[in-house]
Image (cartoon, rainbow, N blue to C red):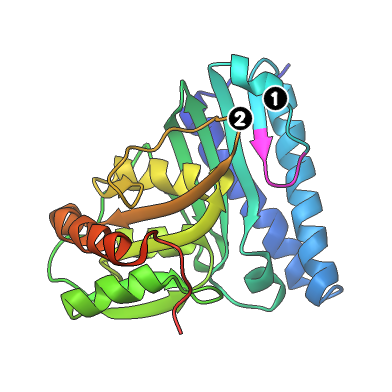
């Protein structure tokens, strides 16, 4: 007999289990580099898909590592996951990789979990609050393709712009108070954002597009150009500077030199 789990409990257990699988295959040291990254993607994806097929067979599924079935567009419930966010970081022994699990209902993440397995923690929308107190005066951005708009905002606010790994890691470090904001431009996909946005909003952080538009998931086109996650008291100022950058440059695109 299959155990019955609430959506919240299932979300959290999938994030935890995926992290354990990934740590296990990396920890024994039999694979390295690209082969390790590909194995991590494949094994984590397969396990998540099997779990959802058994426990939520009527729900839709969208994952970076699976063929997109557009029947999801007619389903009010879709699991949007990235089994391994930050494959390069994972495969090279860094800690800034993550596991993203989100249940999206009618376009909104209702249950979300972001695991940072190397830190031994899963951040859960069911039980999370962001750290308050003094500002760190730092903005997190991609270290592979640092967006110029993030550097622009940091300069205007006299903040430091710091590049770190996966989207989930950046968002959760804002939650922890290590950074005051995470700014992304240049493109991501729904699986990069659904779980971090779900957890961030549950924690009381601001999470929107760079023009302030609310996030809506389970679209036919899964590409999402930009993202802002930040402490709520900084949102208006950051959005104002981002708008000024766009007016000056015509878009949010552009990689920092």
In the image, is residue 60 above or below residue 37?
above
Q: In the structure shown, which secondary structural element does the residue marked by tag 2 occupy?
A: loop
Front-lying residue, 86 or 12: 86
Q: Main secondary structure of the magenta part?
A: loop
Q: Position of residue 251 (x, y in %)?
A: 39, 59
Q: Which residues are magenta?
A: 62-66
Q: CA distance from mark 2 to mark 1?
A: 7 Å
Name the residue that disc number 2 marks: 220
Q: Position of residue 34 (x, y in %)?
A: 81, 71
Q: Decide: marks 2, 1 in contact (CB < 8 A)?
A: yes
Picture quadrant of residue 94: bottom right
For the question of whether residue 3 can be seen, the reply is no
Residue 70, disc: 1
Residue under the image location 47 percent in, 74 percent down: 146
Residue under the image location 40 percent in, 73 percent down: 148
Outermost residue to the bottom = 257
Residue under the image location 49 percent in, 29 percent down: 104
For the question of whether residue 194 can be seen, the reply is yes
Q: On the picture, is 32 further left or further right than 146?
A: right
The reply to whether the magenta stretch includes residue 196 is no
Q: In the structure shown, which secondary structural element does the residue marked by tag 1 occupy?
A: helix
Front-lying residue, 151 or 180: 151
Mark 1 burial class by Cα count in 10 Å: few <14, some 14-19, many 20+: some
Residue under the image location 25 percent in, 54 percent down: 130
- Closer to the chain start, of discs 2 and 1, is 1
Q: Position of residue 15 (x, y in %)?
A: 57, 46
Residue 108, disc: none
């Amino acid at each position: 007999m299959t155990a019955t789990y609430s959506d919240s409990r299932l979300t959290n257990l999938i994030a935890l289990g995926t992290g354990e699988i990934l740590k296990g295959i990396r920890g024994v040291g039999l694979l390295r580099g690209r082969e390790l990254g590909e194995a991590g993607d494949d094994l984590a994806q397969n396990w998540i898909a099997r779990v959802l097929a058994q426990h939520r067979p009527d729900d839709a599924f969208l994952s970076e590592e699976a063929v997109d079935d557009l029947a999801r567009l007619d389903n009010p419930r879709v699991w949007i996951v990235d089994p391994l966010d930050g494959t390069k970081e994972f495969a090279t022994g860094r800690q800034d990789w993550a596991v993203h699990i989100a249940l999206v209902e009618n376009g909104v993440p209702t249950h979300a979990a972001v695991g940072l397995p190397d830190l031994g923690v899963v951040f859960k929308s069911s039980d999370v609050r962001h750290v308050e107190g003094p500002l760190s005066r730092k903005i997190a951005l991609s270290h592979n393709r640092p967006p110029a708009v993030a550097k622009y905002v940091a300069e205007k606010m006299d903040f430091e712009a710091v590049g770190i790994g996966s989207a989930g890691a950046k968002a959760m470090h804002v939650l922890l108070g290590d950074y005051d904001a995470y700014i992304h431009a240049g493109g991501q996909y729904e699986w990069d954002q659904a779980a971090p946005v779900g957890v961030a909003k549950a924690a009381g952080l601001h999470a929107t597009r760079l023009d302030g538009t609310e996030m809506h998931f389970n679209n036919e086109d899964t590409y999402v150009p930009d993202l802002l996650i930040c402490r709520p008291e900084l949102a208006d100022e950051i959005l104002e500077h981002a708008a000024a950058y766009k007016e000056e440059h015509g878009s949010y695109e552009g990689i920092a030199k």
